[in-house]
Image (spheres, rainbow, N blue to C red):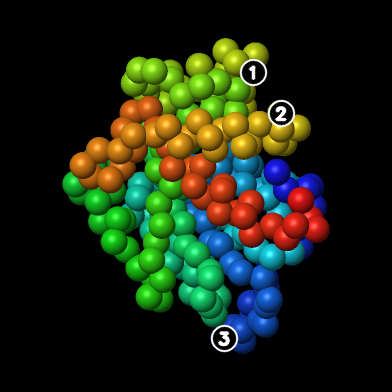
């Protein structure tokens, strides 16, 4: 697990002027307004070789089409280079695959493929995997998943995740997430999550000296 290092502010962009940078960039647009950003902003994910730009949903507009728009708007601010990545973190419990999720599967922005970190039913499943094995049966919905997480922690707040609580078990969560099985639509079956793939990539970019 990466050593705790406070990240520098996101790369500033003024007008059309592009800023030189040595670090790779990962732009991550999230369905949620708080929880995903709380987690991805943990100091253990920040290092000198990668800059994370987290884009939460805004004003309750969390449908996939809006998340893709948020990602595109943010990506336009940067001169994307080889090694940069664009991600969407999204749940499946509220969206129809054919009309709302499927259009994201082959999406590209500035010729860069959009990668998906999908959770079924919701992001809280990945949080739950920090403390428990992958559930053996489907989880009904996000409320049920939150209740299961709360039963493990004693309390749970979407807007107030404690890094000290989750950080020691990140590798455990990644390993449990690898048990995810996939359907014919290439999305995680319930229960399952792709978030571990994103976290693994972020941690892999951390220099040995900063681990």
Foreground label between 1 and 3: 1
Q: With respect to residue 2, does 131 lie above or below?
A: above
Asked whether, in this view, residue 155 is left or right of residue 121, the answer is right
- Foreground residue, 86 or 13? 86
Asked whether residue 68 appears in the rendered view, the answer is yes
- CA distance for labels 1 and 3: 47 Å
- Foreground residue, 155 or 188? 188
Q: With respect to residue 140, does 210 lie above or below?
A: below
The residue singled out by tag 1 in the image is 153
Q: Position of residue 139 (x, y in %)?
A: 37, 21
Q: Is disc 2 surrounded by few (<14), some (14 to 19) or many (20+) residues within 10 Å? A: few
Find numbered disc 1 in the image and state the secondary structure of the residue it sits on: helix
Q: Are marks 1 and 2 in contact (CB under 8 Å)?
A: yes
Which label was assigned to residue 165? Answer: 2
Q: Position of residue 26 (x, y in %)?
A: 56, 62
Quarter residue 120 falls in: top left
The residue singled out by tag 3 in the image is 16
- Foreground residue, 140 or 194? 194
Q: Earlier in the sequence, mark 1 or mark 2?
A: 1
Find numbered disc 2 in the image and state the secondary structure of the residue it sits on: helix
Residue at 63% of width from left, 42% of height from top?
38
Residue at 35% of width from left, 47% of height from top?
63
């Amino acid at each position: 697990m990466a050593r705790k290092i406070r990240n520098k502010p996101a790369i500033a962009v003024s007008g059309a002027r592009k800023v030189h940078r040595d670090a790779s960039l990962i732009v991550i647009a999230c369905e949620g307004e708080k929880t995903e950003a709380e987690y991805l902003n943990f100091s253990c994910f920040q290092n000198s070789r990668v800059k994370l730009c987290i884009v939460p949903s805004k004003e309750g507009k969390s449908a996939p089409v809006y998340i893709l728009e948020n990602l595109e708007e943010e990506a336009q601010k940067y001169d994307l280079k080889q090694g940069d990545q664009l991600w969407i973190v999204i749940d499946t419990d509220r969206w129809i695959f054919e009309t709302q999720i499927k259009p994201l599967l082959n999406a590209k922005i500035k010729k860069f493929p959009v990668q998906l970190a999908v959770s079924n039913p919701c992001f809280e499943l990945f949080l739950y995997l920090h403390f428990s094995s992958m559930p053996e049966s489907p989880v009904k919905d996000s409320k049920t998943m939150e209740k299961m997480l709360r039963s493990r922690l004693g309390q749970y707040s979407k807007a107030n995740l404690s890094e000290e609580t989750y950080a020691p078990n990140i590798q455990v969560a990644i390993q449990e997430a690898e048990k995810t099985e996939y359907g014919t639509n290439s999305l995680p079956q319930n229960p399952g999550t792709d978030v571990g793939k994103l976290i693994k990539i972020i941690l892999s970019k951390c220099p040995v000296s900063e681990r």
